[in-house]
Image (cartoon, rainbow, N blue to C red):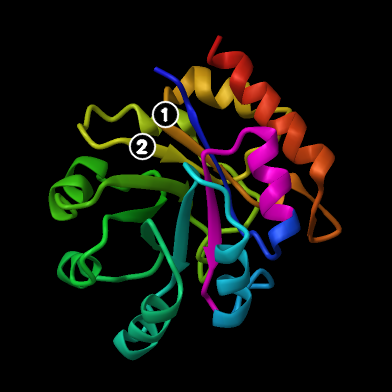
Amino acid sequence: MRTRIKICGITSPEIARHAVDAGADAIGLMFYPNSSRYLTIDQAVEINRKALPFVAQVGVFVNPEKQVMDSILSAVHLDYLQFHGEESPDYCASFGKPYIKAIRVSESTDLLAVEKQYQDAAGLLLDSHISDRYGGTGQSFEWCQAQYGGQKPIILAGGLTADNVQAAIATAGPYGVDVSSGVETEAMKDPVKIIKFCQNVNRCNQ
């Protein structure tokens, strides 16, 4: 199975183009105001306008109010919604778009129970559990926990870099990998790191 690549935290059309040219299957647009990668609606629309075909655009949210969601979805094209907070299954499914539920994994996380709870999710994104943080921590968890025997497509996140992504794929066998801080230099997306990350993932696909 080919491992898909999502570059998250895209902040400009130029970085989106770098990600796609490097081989990304999806880009993540961040709508969480507390994130340094937060996009306004106007910024997201500009990325929409210059997007390339056949590349999924994923909106990333943390406990968004419905009014905020409605405003974004009325203006911005998104192929998938990705929820990182405590959103209920009903809430995630209420917007009529396929969604990915992010799970912060600790030693006590019962992923089979989570999968049953979010049975309508298109996939589960597994990230490291850091108190009061909703992703983008640059820290990994025990990748073997992704092999929990479930049926949902698994997207691996948390602390991935070009240097460790091949080991992560070999251990977890995920449907996809998701990277943000691991392809940044001084909190900015680094085209060289994006290329190296995608190259190393694709070496696993050969």
Query: Which residue corresponds to mark 1?
Result: 174
Query: Could you tell which of marks 2 and 1 lies nearer the N-terminus?
Result: 2
Residue drawn at 48 percent across, 55 percent down = 57
Could you tell me the amino acid type at mark 2?
Ile
Q: In this view, does 55 lie above or below 199?
A: below
Q: In which quarter of the image is the C terminus?
A: top right
Residue drawn at 33 percent across, 83 percent down = 70
* Magenta-colored span: 15-32
Q: In this view, does 34 lie to the left or right of 192?
A: left
- Residue 93: mark: none
> Is the residue under label 1 in contact with that under label 2 (CB below 8 Å)?
yes
Q: Residue 190 at x, y = what percent?
A: 81, 48
Where disc 1 sits, the SS reads loop
Front residue of this view, candidates 49 and 143? 49
Q: In this view, does 190 lie to the left or right of 1?
A: right
Residue drawn at 20 percent across, 66 percent down = 96
Front residue of this view, candidates 14 and 95? 14
Q: Is residue 58 above or below residue 65?
A: above
Q: Residue 84 at x, y = what percent?
A: 41, 64
- Residue 154: mark: 2
Where disc 2 sits, the SS reads strand
Q: In this view, does 98 lie to the left or right of 77?
A: left
Q: State the CA–CA distance, disc 2 to disc 1.
A: 5 Å
Disc 2: CA contacts within 10 A as few (<14), some (14-19) or many (>=20): many
Q: Residue furthest bottom?
A: 67
Res 36 quadrant in image: bottom right
Q: Residue 157 at x, y = what percent?
A: 52, 44
Q: Residue 106 at x, y = what percent?
A: 41, 48
Could you tell me the amino acid type at mark 1?
Pro
